[in-house]
Amino acid sequence: DFIGLVSIETTIKTMLPYHTELQRFDRKMRRRSAQESDVDKEADAIVAAFEQEFSKTPEPEFEKSVKLDLTDANLKRWFGDAIITSAIQIEDLSSVGALDLVRLLDYPGDFVPVVSTTTENSTTTSQNVHVIDTLALSKELARSYVQDLLDSLVRR
């Protein structure tokens, strides 16, 4: 079942006031002048900086000191309208129609939660939740459209 989706940017912005460690990490990331060109090295550097900020209190007290209980009330208060709580239902993602594409591209947000149904045999079905990146989808559709145009010109 789909429950909800909140963007990373909204989550970080909302949680910063609750964690001094996260605030220090955020400041450190904003002050960084050099970034690694190698993606793996860059990810390692970011993880190391994160661990450095969050490892100043010894275990197990540390986990207790930074833990925040997530209740329905907190979730609504912290994220409110930023929570996307409804997903688009598309039965078969392998054969998406034009109307489904319009629904995906018109969705309010960069990422669209989609619930699809998979039938494994005649009696067993399961629901799958996917998150579609609308920017990537738009680029892929544009690329496909241009390729079709070029193909039609070559056939003339």
Image (cartoon, grey):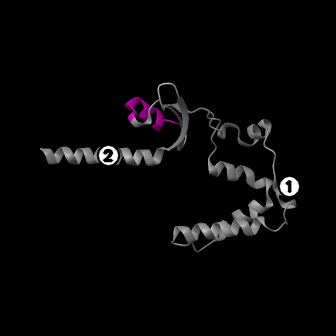
Return the disc, 1 or 2, that comes first in the chain's sequence: 1
Q: Nearer the viewer, residue 3 or 32?
A: 3
Magenta-drawn stretch contains 105: yes
Residue type marked 2: Ser
Q: What span is in magenta?
A: 95-107
Question: Closer to the observer: label 1 or label 2?
Answer: 1
Magenta: main secondary structure equals helix
Horizontal and vertical percent position of residue 45 = 63, 70
Quadrant position of residue 109: top right
Report the side of 143 relative to 107 (left or right): left
Residue 31 screen position, x and y as percent = 66, 70
Q: Please give the residue where the numbered disc 1 appears in the rendered image.
A: 64
Q: Nearer the viewer, residue 60 or 33?
A: 60
Disc 1 and disc 2 in contact, CB within 8 angstroms:
no
Dot 1: few (<14), some (14–19), or many (≥20) neighbours within 10 Å? Answer: few
Measured from the top left, where is residue 108 in percent x and y? 54, 37
Query: Circle 2 sits on which residue?
Result: 144
Work out which quarter of the rendered image holds the N terminus and state it. Answer: top right
Asked if the magenta segment contains residue 6, the reply would be no
Mark number for residue 22?
A: none
User: For numbered disc 1, what is the local secondary structure?
Assistant: helix
Q: Amino acid at mark 1?
A: Lys
Find the residue positioned furthest to the left.
156
**Residue 31 versus residue 53: which sits nearer the camera?**
53
Q: Residues within 10 Å of mark 2 (few under 14, many from 20)?
A: few
Quarter assignment of residue 115: top right
Mark-to-mark CA distance, 1 and 2: 51 Å
User: Is 113 left, or right, of 62 in this rendering?
Assistant: left
